[in-house]
Amino acid sequence: MADTDYPSFLELDIPPASFEEAAVHIIPVEMEKSVSYGGGTAAGPRAILEASLQLEAFDGRTVPGEAGIYTHKPLKCQADEVEKDIEDIALEVAGVLEKNGLPVILGGEHTVTLGSLKAITASGKRIGVVQFDAHADLRDSYENNRYSHACVMRRVQEMGLPFVQIGVRSLSKEEYLFRRTHNIQSLDGADIAAAGIPAAVLPWDFPEHIYITFDVDCFDASIMPATGTPEPGGLTWYQVMDLLHKVSTKRSICGFDVVELAPIPTMHAPDFTAAKLVYKLIGLALS
């Protein structure tokens, strides 16, 4: 077990591997500091892990769990300063990278992405970021907080990392202008609704190694109501699967996070959807 009454990912079907032997490292991060509408993201990691116990180990193509999965103890994020939380996440991810493991972050609010990216870029790997999200998250500050979940991709842009936004359907005028000024590549929800998913989703010169950050509100609210900032007009399960396969073709997933799940008591479907998404991403990263 990862923690008292805190299950390891998929542990009923795949016995947890040791830290040294695991190819996949699940890092739960219970961060909830800047939610701006509905709350509950701190409970997201536990809900995903509990739902993973109901997954089939066979994902339809392979059994990714056979590579070995180790679930870390949850990071509670009780520090007063979010910079300290980001540093704690980075240290945890750095330890995984030293073992050539795949870091998988379960949020928590979207700010957790910054800790993971800090560690991966510090390792010297050149990466691009693929963001699945209903929101652009490009505000310079939100509610006087530069580390708000609404600002995470602005901080990524400041890190000098190329990124592509997929599924966005809500952004401020400031963010709209920022995307145009900085030529940020996007495939918005309206684009997909109007013309479908293109054959090539990423630019031809996008880095070989990619980090995927997946805010669950990218899904349509009809299948993912359990999130603090739902938006209509989102993506379906099979649209997301198609997009994930296309962005990972000829690319190597070096890490990913799934964030912003805010579980709804007695409603299991969103938790299970998030857990299945995590397992699908693991399979793509290992293939």
Image: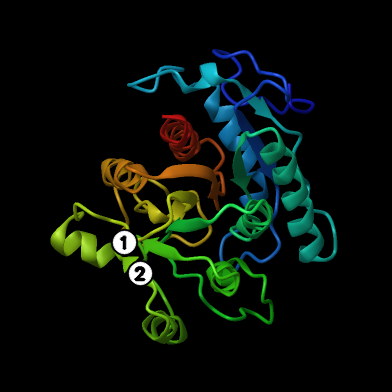
How is this picture coloured?
A: rainbow
Give the CA separation, mark 1 to mark 2. Answer: 8 Å
For label 2, the crowd category at 10 Å Cα-Cα, with few meaning under 14, some 14 to 19 and many 20 or more, is: some
User: Which residue is denoted by mark 2 in the rendering?
Assistant: 185
Q: Mark 1 and 2 residues: CB-CB less than 8 Å, in contact? A: yes
Q: Is residue 40 visible?
A: no
Residue 252 horizontal/vertical position (percent): 44, 42
Q: Is residue 24 left or right of residue 205?
A: right
Q: Is residue 193 left or right of residue 82?
A: left
Is 227 or 192 nearer to us in this picture? 192
* Three-letter code for the amino acid on which mark 2 is drawn: Gln
Which quadrant, please, contains the N terminus?
Answer: top right
Which quadrant, please, contains the C terminus?
Answer: top left
Q: Nearer the viewer, mark 1 or mark 2?
A: 1
In the image, residue 259 above or below residue 24: below
Q: Secondary structure at mark 1?
A: loop
Which quarter of the picture shows residue 207? bottom left
Residue 42 horizontal/vertical position (percent): 67, 49
* Three-letter code for the amino acid on which mark 1 is drawn: Pro
Residue 194 horizontal/vertical position (percent): 15, 64
User: Which residue is denoted by mark 1 in the rendering?
Assistant: 203
Residue drawn at x 69%, y 37% as measured from the top left: 96
Is 278 or 125 nearer to us in this picture? 125
Residue 151 horizontal/vertical position (percent): 58, 72
